Amino acid sequence: MRKEDKVAIIAQLGELLKQYPHFYLVDVAGMNAADTSSLRRKCYEKDLKMVVVKNTLMTKALEAAEGDFEELKPALVGTTALILTQTANVPAKLIKELNGKKQEKPAFKAAYAEGAIYVGADQLMTLVALKSKNELIADVVAALESPIMNVLSALENREAKAAEEAATE
């Protein structure tokens, strides 16, 4: 590959890292064409961007990117796919789902999610449990809404009892 091509690819990877706040590095070595195509389709359905990358070019893109990604470099071995996302836990859930179907690949290597770095297969469940911003907002709204709903329900029951008592008199 020519140097100009490498520089262009590194720049493209850098732009992708700026566009997406979270990314995963996964091992796709040994996946056949059908499995790879299926993975790409599932990524597309979940609004994820998947790119198979050369480890050396990804290393250079990480070095050029804003932030300290030094901890991710040891994960850049073998065949690596970069999965980019707007929602931190979606790729983790997809990988868990696929691995639950007795597939060994894609295998989780590392991730940068919610401003933190996660390295190693043992971190996958942590990422699955990680709540997105929208999920946290929904939890807060539900927590705030619950007492109000209880009060409204109690008032409705009280009104119904009062109406029932008035009807029997």
Image (tube, rainbow, N blue to C red):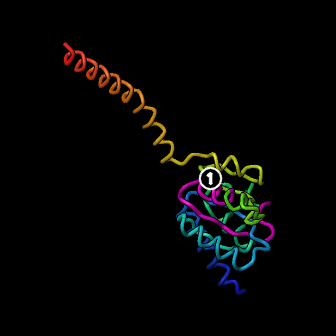
Q: Residues within 10 Å of mark 1 (few under 14, many from 20)?
A: many
Residue 143, position as x, y percentages in the image: 46, 32
For this rendering, which residue is in front, 3 or 96? Answer: 96
* Residue at 29% from the left image edge and 19% from the top image edge: 158
151 w.r.t. 84: above or below:
above
Amino acid found under the numbered disc labelled 1: Ala
For this rendering, which residue is in front, 160 or 69? Answer: 160
Going by the image, does 105 lie left or right of 7?
A: right
Residue 51, position as x, y percentages in the image: 64, 72
Residue bearing the label numbered 1? 113
Q: Is residue 1 magenta?
A: no
- Screen quadrant of the C terminus: top left
Instruction: Find residue 100 and report its image quarter.
Output: bottom right
In what element is the residue under mark 1? Answer: strand
Instruction: Give the residues drawn in magenta, as a range.
Output: 74-96
Going by the image, does 43 lie left or right of 161?
A: right
* Residue at 66% from the left image edge and 50% from the top image edge: 127
Query: Looking at the image, which residue sits at the far bottom?
Result: 2
Q: Is residue 89 magenta?
A: yes
Instruction: Find residue 49 and report its image quarter.
Output: bottom right
* Residue at 59% from the left image edge and 56% from the top image edge: 90
For this rendering, which residue is in front, 47 or 113? Answer: 47
Number of numbered discs present?
1
Residue 159, position as x, y percentages in the image: 26, 21
